[in-house]
C-alpha cells in the first residue's frame, strides 16, 4: 500500500515536471500570416540570399515543414535560448527532420551562423 502510493505520487511529480519543461520550451503555433511574412524576407547579402533561397527557404517558410519560420521571432526564442553554438552544430549535423547543412552543401559554418541570425530575426546587417 505504502509503495503503491509512493509510486503514484512519484508519477504525478514526474508528469508535473514534464509539463513544466514542455511549457517552457513551447513556441507559439505558426499562423498563415507568419508563413506569408517568412516568404517575403530575404538576406541582404547576395551570396547568402542565393544559399538561403535554394535550401533553408524551402522548409523555413512552410508551416507544413514544421520548421521554425523565418522572422517568427517568438518561434525562434526557445531555440536561441539553447545558444548559438548548439544551433550552429544542429544546423551543420542535422536535427530531427532538419537535414545536415539544411541541404546547402556549399554552406560554411559561418554561413550557417549568418543564416540563423537572419532567420531568427527576420533581418540581417548588410556585409
Ligand atoms: C528539408 C527541410 C529543411 C531545410 C531545407 C532546412 N531546415 Fe532547418 N529545420 C527543419 C525542421 C523540420 C526543423 C525543426 C526540427 C525540430 O525541432 O525537430 C529545423 C530546425 C532548424 C534549426 C533549429 C535547430 C535547433 O537546435 O533547434 C536551425 C538553426 C535550422 N533549422 C537552420 C537551417 C538552415 C540555416 C537551413 C539552410 C541552410 C535550413 N535549416 C534548412 C527543416 C529544414
Image (cartoon, rainbow, N blue to C red):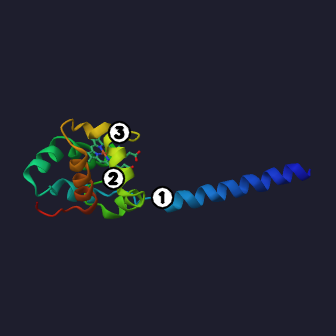
Left or right relative to 17: residue 56: left
The 10 Å Cα crowd at callout 3, few under 14, some 14 to 19, many 20 or more, is: few
Q: Distance from label 2 to label 3 (Cα)?
A: 17 Å
Q: Earlier in the sequence, mark 1 or mark 2?
A: 1
Q: Residue furthest left?
A: 46
Q: Secondary structure at mark 3?
A: helix
User: Badge 2 is on which residue?
Assistant: 68
For marks 3 and 1, give the one nearer the viewer.
Answer: 3
For marks 2 and 3, give the one nearer the viewer.
Answer: 3
Q: Secondary structure at mark 2?
A: loop
Q: Secondary structure at mark 1?
A: helix
Residue 67 visible in rendering: no
User: Badge 1 is on which residue?
Assistant: 25
Residue located at (10% from left, 48% from top): 47
* Ligand number 1: quarter of image: top left
Mark 2, ligand 1, within 8 Å: the answer is yes
User: Badge 3 is on which residue?
Assistant: 93
Q: Distance from label 1 to label 2 (Cα)?
A: 13 Å
The 10 Å Cα crowd at callout 1, few under 14, some 14 to 19, many 20 or more, is: some
Residue located at (15% from left, 64% from top): 125
Q: Distance from label 3 to label 1 (Cα)?
A: 22 Å
The 10 Å Cα crowd at callout 2, few under 14, some 14 to 19, many 20 or more, is: many
Image quadrant assignment for residue 69: bottom left
Image quadrant assignment for residue 104: top left
Q: Position of residue 118 (x, y in %)?
A: 22, 58
Image quadrant assignment for residue 73: bottom left
Q: Position of residue 37 (x, y in %)?
A: 21, 59
Amino acid at each position: 500500500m505504502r509503495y503503491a502510493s509512493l509510486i503514484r505520487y512519484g508519477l504525478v511529480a514526474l508528469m508535473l515536471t514534464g509539463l513544466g519543461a514542455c511549457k517552457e520550451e513551447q513556441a507559439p503555433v505558426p499562423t498563415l500570416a507568419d508563413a506569408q511574412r517568412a516568404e517575403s524576407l530575404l538576406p541582404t547579402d547576395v551570396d547568402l540570399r542565393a544559399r538561403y533561397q535554394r535550401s533553408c527557404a524551402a522548409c523555413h517558410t512552410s508551416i507544413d515543414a514544421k520548421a521554425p519560420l523565418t522572422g517568427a521571432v517568438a518561434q525562434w526564442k526557445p531555440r536561441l535560448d539553447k545558444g548559438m553554438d548548439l544551433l550552429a552544430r544542429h544546423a551543420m549535423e542535422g536535427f530531427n527532420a532538419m537535414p545536415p547543412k539544411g541541404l546547402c552543401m556549399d554552406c560554411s559554418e559561418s554561413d550557417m551562423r549568418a543564416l540563423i541570425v537572419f532567420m531568427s530575426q527576420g533581418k540581417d546587417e548588410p556585409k
